[in-house]
Amino acid sequence: MKSLILSLALAMPLLATVPGHAQAQQAAATAAPGKLVVDNGTRILATLQQRRAEFQKDQAALKAFIDGELRTSFDREYAARLVLGVHGRGASDADVKLFADAMADNLMQRYGTALLSFEGKPRIRLKSETPLPGNRGVKVATELLRDGADPIPVDYYVRNNGGWKIFDVMVEGVSYVQTFRSQFDGPLRQKSIAQVAAELRNGSLQSAPADGAR
């Protein structure tokens, strides 16, 4: 279940701005990140519920919806550098972008349909906002609520990079960045970033969030 929850958490563009609208982008840059998480997360959950039948029939429409949102709200390149860790030192921006896009596409291909399997009217509750050390951003602590189920803690790590953007997600104490850093350490010791990205693209290497008992 944890991989399913993570897919939902990553797919929520909780900090989305509206591309091309300067006033909306400025508002997103100055608004409290916690409010953006709740407001926009609620909008995404509602859209997934309302368009469930359409998305079940048309996987391309689901992918386009999620991918479009992620591109505006998820700090892919920064998150990718954190995942790459020591293997990203000295890496070109082009290689980091290649890896970031390949990882995001692989996650979407593997877990995209799981977004439609949530029952119990999922919704988000804000718990707290905590500044990160060194002015690195803000931790937004939330809970994913579902009817008839225990709340699931989901923490978003965000930074203001032309608007508040996600760079890590922690579900029930398990970090997206740390999980994938451990997973890709072995392949990256043996192959180049471009080779690992290519394997993610063709499916021979899979991103696999740690699963839990839920």
Image: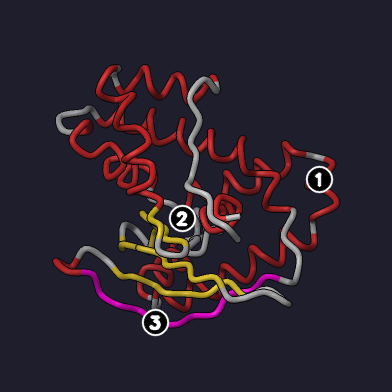
Q: Amino acid at mark 1?
A: Gln
Local SS, label 2? helix
Circle 2/circle 1 CB separation < 8 Å: no
- The residues tagged by marks 2 and 1 sit, at their Cα atoms, a distance apart of 24 Å
> Which residue occupies the foreground of this view, 69 or 121?
121
Residue 26 appears at what percent x and percent y? Answer: 39, 68
Tell me if 119 is positioned left or right of 87 in this view.
right
Q: Residue at x 33, y 24 (%)?
A: 187
Is residue 127 on the magenta stretch?
yes
- The residues tagged by marks 3 and 2 sit, at their Cα atoms, a distance apart of 20 Å
Q: Is residue 146 above or below residue 161?
A: below
Circle 2 is placed at which residue position? 73
Q: Is residue 68 above or below residue 149?
A: above
Q: Residue at x 31, y 62 (%)?
A: 159
Tell me if 11 is positioned left or right of 179 in this view.
right
- Count of numbered circles in the view: 3
Q: Amino acid at mark 2?
A: Ser
Kindly report which numbered mark, 3 or 2, lies closer to the viewer in this rendering.
3
Q: Amino acid at mark 3?
A: Ser
Q: Is residue 166 above or below residue 100?
A: below
Q: Quadrant of residue 193?
A: top left
> Which region is colored magenta?
122-132
Q: Main secondary structure of the magenta part?
A: strand
